[in-house]
Image (cartoon, rainbow, N blue to C red):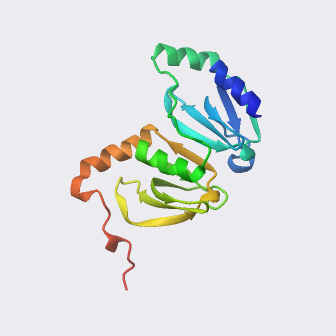
Amino acid sequence: MLIELEKARTRKNVVRIFREDLDGPDNWTDGFVVDANEEMVLLQLVDDGVHLNGYQILFLEDISDFVHPAPFNDFQKRVLELRDEEIEDPEVDLDDLAVLLVDISEEFGLVTLHREEVEADSCEIGRVIRADAVSFELEEIGSDARWFDETFEYDLYDITRIEFGSSYEEALILANDDMGEDSYELADEYEESV
């Protein structure tokens, strides 16, 4: 698989990746291969509106199939060219998962982490403030763009998908920056009344 991913990267073709066990048979990801190693692949995503929209890191062991080139590859590439949207390497190192998470948080401000084998329909968004060989600590941001008052610790190897640099994460950062003193939730909002 790694050889085929490298071919797609070199040829700058869109690939379609399936993770049937995690996403079901009718879901996939379209994107350009930016980097890959024996464990992970880094994609720059092509969204439904044919825009480059952030990055996704998938684990090769979760990939059930992929198509190269993806259906509509020529159309997608032509539209992106007409829009002057070019593939950009975010220059993150895939060799160490813990270092990778901290680097993404520092460089992009937010990272979206999916743990689909633990919680299939949810994700955590925030900045990783500490990571080691087995766990990471996340300062999370809510859907209202406010930081939670406390941090949360998760198992590093529960992560099944990593996303960053998308318009949604950028929107959260933009809204949070605009809030000033109100950019954090109040801790008492989470306490249950007695």
Locate the C terminus by quadrant.
Answer: bottom left
Most distant residue in the left direction: 181
In this picture, is 114 found above or below 30? Answer: below
Q: Is 122 on the left-hand or right-hand side of 70?
A: left
Left or right: 153 as drawn, with respect to 171? right
Q: How many numbered discs sit on the rendered protein?
A: 0
Q: Residue at x 43, y 37 (%)?
A: 167
Q: Which of 74 and 130 lies nearest the eye of the viewer?
A: 130
Residue 84, horizontal then vertical, whole percent: 45, 17
Picture coordinates of residue 188, whole percent (x, y): 32, 74
Specify whether residue 72 is in view.
no
Q: Return the residue nearer the eye: 186 or 72.
A: 186
Q: Quadrant of residue 187?
A: bottom left
Q: Quadrant of the N terminus?
A: top right
Nearer the observer, 24 or 40:
40
- Is residue 89 visible in this depiction of the protein? yes
Asked which quadrant contains residue 65, the reply is top right
* Front residue of 151 and 143: 151
Indicate left or right for 114 with 128 as reference: right
Q: Is residue 43 above or below residue 109?
A: above
Residue found 32% across the figure and 43% down from its top: 174
Percent of width and height locating residue 89: 52, 30
The extreme bottom residue here reads: 194
Q: Residue at x 76, y 29 (%)?
A: 3
Residue 149 percent across, percent down from the top left = 36, 66
Residue 25: image quadrant is top right
Residue in view at x 61 percent, y 62 percent: 134
